[in-house]
Image (cartoon, rainbow, N blue to C red):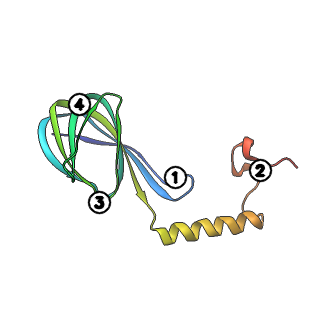
Amino acid sequence: MCRIKKIRSGASRQGFARPQQREIGPACTAGRFNWFYDIDETIFVIEGGVVIKDEAGNARRLNAGDTIFFPKRASAEWNVETYIRKIAFCRTPLPWPLAFAKRGIRSVKRRMNIGGGQDSGPAMFQRDK
C-alpha cells in the first residue's frame, strides 16, 4: 500500500492552476491496482520501478529518474513488482473561461500600468526608465 504525505500546496504565480506536491512514500509495496486521476498529475520516480498500463492497453516501465504525466480523467493500471518511491506534482487547472478572463484582466492592467510597480517581478523583467 501507499502512504500519502502532503508537502506543499498553493496557487501558481500565474494563477492559472493550484499546484500541489505530494510525496507518496516511503514506498508503495508490491501489488496491482487501478488508479483514476481527478486532476493533472506528474510523477517522478525516486526509487524502484513500476509497469503502468494505460486505458488503451499500452504498457510502460518506469524506473528511478523517469517522469510521467497523467491528465485529468485518465486512468491507469499500476503493477508494482517490488516497491516504488515517487513524488507527485498535482495540478488543478482553472476552468478555461476563468483562465481566459484572468488573462484579459492582466492584459488590461498591464496596458494601463495598474498594479505593477518595480516590485512586480524579477529585476531581469523590469523596464529601464
Indicate the secondary structure of the residue bearing disc 4.
Answer: strand
Quick one: label 1 or label 2, which is nearer the N terminus?
1
Question: Comparing marks 3 and 1, which lies closer to the viewer?
Answer: 3
Asked where in the image residue 93 lies, by quadrant, the reply is: bottom left
Question: Comparing marks 4 and 2, which lies closer to the viewer?
Answer: 4
Whether residue 129 is visible = yes
Residue at which label 3 appears: 73
Q: CA distance from mark 3 to mark 4?
A: 23 Å
Residue at which label 4 appears: 49
Seen at 81% across and 49% down, the residue is: 127
Seen at 11% across and 38% down, the residue is: 31
Seen at 49% across and 54% down, the residue is: 11
Measured as percent of width and height from the top left, residue 47 is found at: 28, 27
Q: Is there a contact, CB below 8 Å, between mark 4 and mark 1? A: no
Q: CA distance from mark 1 to mark 2?
A: 20 Å
Quick one: label 2 or label 3, which is nearer the N terminus?
3
Q: Give the numbered dot on residue 12.
A: 1
Left or right: 114 as drawn, with respect to 86: right
Measured as percent of width and height from the top left, residue 54 is found at: 23, 49
Q: CA distance from mark 2 to mark 3?
A: 41 Å
Furthest residue toward right? 129
Q: Is there a contact, CB below 8 Å, between mark 4 and mark 2? A: no
Measured as percent of width and height from the top left, residue 97 is found at: 50, 72
Indicate the secondary structure of the residue bearing disc 2.
Answer: helix
